Amino acid sequence: MTRSLSNAPVSRRGVLKAAGAAGAIASAGVLGGRFFSPAIAGPAPKIRLAWTEVAACHSPLGFGVAKGLYAKHTTSTWIFSSRARAARR
């Protein structure tokens, strides 16, 4: 005699729900460990920005250095004049 699936103690739907719940809990644990781990302080990254004083699109660079926006985000920023300005002299 064959056994019908409706009399089975474990249903396929129940197994899939349990596997999905276990996967969600495992991934939440892995991601939670990354988001809530303490940050390790390291040296500030050094950024060199080339700019020209006459270009209007470069004005936010000087403004950010003058107001300390780069230092606020722990970056060591150095602005230097680009070669385009030096070539015009």
Image (spheres, helix red, strand yellow):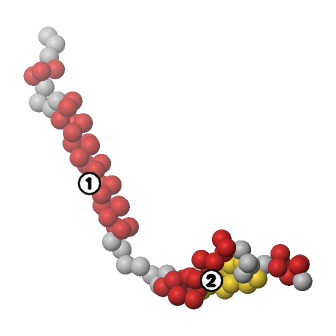
* Number of the front mark, 1 or 2: 2
Please name the residue that numbered disc 2 is placed on.
62
Task: Estimate how packed mark 2 is, as few (under 14), some (14 to 19) or many (20 or more) residues with alpha carbons within 10 Å.
Answer: some
Q: Using the image as rendered, state which of residue 13 and residue 38 is in the foreground.
A: 38
Q: Earlier in the sequence, mark 1 or mark 2?
A: 1
Q: How far, Cα to Cα, is label 1 from label 2?
A: 48 Å
**Mark 2 secondary-structure assignment:** helix
What's the mark number on residue 46? none
On screen, residue 20 versus residue 55, left or right, reads left
What's the mark number on residue 25? 1
Where is residue 13 drawn, in percent x and y? 20, 31
Q: Residue at x 85, y 82 (%)?
A: 86
Q: Amino acid at mark 2?
A: Gly
On screen, residue 37 versus residue 48, left or right, reads left
Task: Estimate how packed mark 1 is, as few (under 14), some (14 to 19) or many (20 or more) residues with alpha carbons within 10 Å.
Answer: few
Q: Is residue 43 visible?
A: no
On screen, residue 4 versus residue 73, left or right, reads left
Q: Using the image as rendered, state which of residue 67 and residue 4 is in the foreground.
A: 67
Quarter of the image for the N terminus: give it.
top left
